[in-house]
Each structure stands twice: as structure tokens, then as C-alpha cells.
Amino acid sequence: MRIKDIAVEERPRERMAKQGPQALSTAELLALVLRQGSAQENVLDLAQRILQHYNLRTLSRATYAELQHLSSIGDAKACQLLACFELGRRLAAFQKEKRITIHSAKDVAKLLLPEMSTLQQEHCKGMYLDARKRVLKEETLFIGSLTASVIHPRELFQKALLEGAAACILVHNHPSGDPAPSEEDIALTKQLRDAGNLLGITFLDHIIIGQKNFCSLREEGFFES
């Protein structure tokens, strides 16, 4: 039977699109990686034949040469399989990396002051944290002039939503070297605090980096109403 002979709604690709990858069997997932079979067998039969020789663990460790010994597995399919399992290994390694935990504004300054204290323009960075205050991502949101930097709450919180963050911190530098907050900094802090409350994402702090020191607007009491 050819894939084209299977009812459209029962084909692996269509089922994945509607039901998600968890709905597919191991053979069906493998068939999607291989993409096509040969003149002698369709891709599902090829996937099932491979799984008769290997289980997932042994297949993930197979070498390029070993894969090519399988009938109907040429250069392209061997490379596709190797790439698939290598991505899985890299994901596993990434998940095991120890994430930095933020306990205070001092932890943020320790990370960013060496980089941001020497910048000649204002840079705004968003720091995104999970529920345990571990850093998920750090991203530059805006680069402004020597005297002013403008950021809208959506710039900070849109990325927080995309990252699935439970909390976020805004960090920006003052090229003058003085981290004392301006009236605009204070107003922005309260605006971001209120936006975070509406979205259910905690706005933990707004930190200003100076030449050798920093200012936490939360620690200075500017988060109060």
C-alpha cells in the first residue's frame, strides 16, 4: 500500500497537524523523518523494518556507515536520522544546564554590570525568569540615544509570554555613569508594574546600571503605589 492509498485523515502528517506528535506511533514519527520510501516499500514499511533491526536507543547510537547498510537507506536518509538524534542529545544537554537563579538585584548587577557599564548608548534589556526565579532568557529590547531610551510595556511582556516566563526584570544603563533614576524611569517602572499585574507576570524589578554601581527601583521603594 502506498501512502497515497491511505485515507487523508489517517496519514501521519495530517494526524500530527490535527492531534500533535504524541498521537503518532514510533514508526509513524520515524516515517516523517525519513519522508519517503522506495519503489519496493512505502515509508511506513521502511520505518517499521528499521525498528525491527533497532530500538530507539540503539538507532540513536547507530553510525552513518551502519545506517547505510540498511536497504533503502542512502546518504540523505542516514543524515536525516543522525541529525534528528543529535538534536535530541543537544536538547537533553541544554535541559541539564544549571540555570542562574536571581535572588536579588545584586545578582542581576553581577551578571550585567561588566557589560553594560561601559556602553556609550542606553541599552534596555529584558531578563525573563521561571517560577523559581531561574533565568530563561536575556534579550536586548531597545538601544537608544545617550540621553533617552523609550520602551513600551508590550516590548517587555510580549517576549515574556513567548518564553512562558513567570517574572521579568528590566535593566538599562545610564551612559553618564550615574544610576540615579529619572522621573521617566520612575514613571516607566510603575507602568510596567501595573501591566505585569494585569497579565499575571510579576515585574520583579527595574535596575539601572551606572559606571561602577547600580540602582534597584524596587529596593529604593519606587514600586509602591
Image: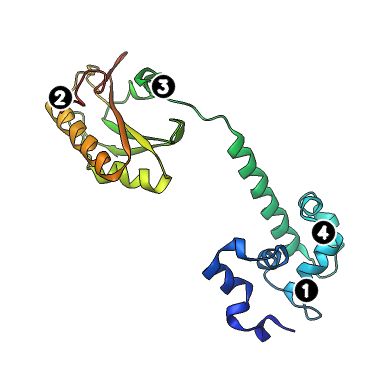
Relative to 118, residue 129 above or below = below
Q: Which label number is shown at residue 72? A: none
Mark 2 closeness class: few <14, some 14–19, many ≥20 residues within 10 Å: few
| Horizontal side, residue 43 vs residue 203: left or right | right
- Camera-near label (1 vs 2) is 1
Mark 3 crowdedness (10 Å alpha carbons): few <14, some 14-19, many ≥20? few
- Whichever of labels 2 and 3 marks the residue nearer the N terminus, that label is 3
Q: Closer to the camera, 25 or 83?
A: 25
Q: Nearer the viewer, mark 2 or mark 3?
A: 3
Question: Marks 3 and 4, Cα distance to the nearest angstrom?
Answer: 49 Å
Q: Tell me which label, 4 or 1, sits earlier in the chain.
A: 1
Label of residue 182 in the image: 2
To which quarter of the image does residue 12 belong?
Answer: bottom right
Task: Report, in whole angstroms, how far the alpha carbon at label 4 lies from the one at label 2.
Answer: 64 Å
Query: Which residue is tagged 3?
Result: 103
Under tag 4, what secondary structure? helix
Which of the pair 72/29 is nearer the observer? Answer: 29
Q: Earlier in the sequence, mark 4 or mark 2?
A: 4
SS assignment at label 1: helix
Picture disc at residue 67: 4
Where's residue 145, x and y in %? 21, 33
Q: Percent x, y for residue 45?
A: 78, 74
Dot 1: within a 10 Å radius of its alpha carbon, few (fewer than 14), some, or many (20 or more) residues? some
Q: Which three-letter amino acid code belongs to the residue tagged 2?
A: Ser
Q: Residue at x 55, y 64 (%)?
A: 20
Q: Residue at x 36, y 45 (%)?
A: 159
Colouring: rainbow
Residue found at x 67% / y 70%: 35
**Distance of label 2 from label 3 (alpha carbons):** 25 Å
Kind of residue indicated by mark 3:
His
Mark 3 or 4: in front is 3
CA gap, disc 1 to disc 2? 68 Å
